[in-house]
Amino acid sequence: MNRHLTIASAVFTWAGALLGLPSLAALLYFVWALVGLHLTPTGNTGGKPEYNSLVGLLVGGAQLAGKAMKWLTAGAQWAIILLAALSLLLLVFAIVLFAVGRGLHAHHAWARVLGVILASGLLLAGASSALMFRQSLAVAAASVVAAMSAYVVWALCREFA
């Protein structure tokens, strides 16, 4: 096996594993949070309080606060659904990265083509991020992504020429 192809295979495999494990953990956590939100009982008071007494005023204020909390809970539920969908997309991307790495290791042509496409996209994202950011650490991280992607594109395209 070509040394550069082995390195490109390892890059895709490890990137998939390192992205997939936290994404899976986040997805499970967000699904657990959604299940917890749906299993909470809704507070339903049976009767109307008498507003001439202090207890009636306190009950009315608590019901008003409960309605406000329902709105906040609904907003939090939408945020959790959005984060769960993002975690699912990252998990699918990690699975694709891992499959491409294993396919490169097995010398499959589909993995080489998909690897060039993925690495080209990451090269474009890394290079544009390095030009866009102003903080030195962000520029360095984006430059490392762009350099690794350029190397992977070179290593994979080298076999086609």
Image (tube, rainbow, N blue to C red):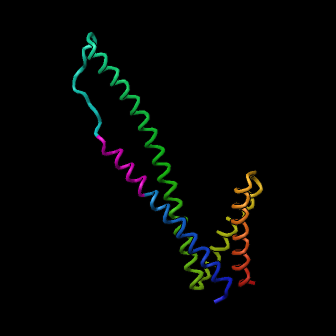
Q: Residue at image x 73%, y 63%?
A: 143
Q: Is residue 59 left or right of residue 84?
A: left
User: Residue 68, percent across and down?
Assistant: 41, 29
Q: Residue at image x 45%, y 57%?
A: 27
Query: Quadrant of the rendered structure where residue 62 is?
Result: top left
Q: Which residues are magenta?
A: 28-40
Q: Look at the image and tell me in which quarter the C terminus lies.
A: bottom right
Q: Is residue 138 left or right of residue 49?
A: right
Please identify the residue farthest to the top as the structure is shown: 52
User: Residue 151, percent across and down?
Assistant: 72, 74
Please identify the residue farthest to the bottom as the structure is shown: 1
Q: Residue at image x 46%, y 57%?
A: 26
User: Residue 32, percent across and down?
Assistant: 37, 53
As drawn, 37 above or below 21: above
Q: Residue at image x 64%, y 78%?
A: 8
Q: Is residue 44 left or right of residue 80?
A: left
Question: What is the chief secondary structure element of the magenta stretch?
Answer: helix
Please identify the residue farthest to the front as the structure is shown: 137
Q: Give 67 or 136, whichever is nearer the viewer.
A: 136
Q: Give 69 or 95, whichever is nearer the viewer.
A: 69
Query: Quadrant of the rendered structure where residue 40 is?
Result: top left
Query: Quadrant of the rendered structure where residue 156 is?
Result: bottom right
User: Residue 89, percent across and down?
Assistant: 52, 59
Q: Look at the image and tell me in which quarter the N terminus lies.
A: bottom right
Q: Is residue 54 magenta?
A: no
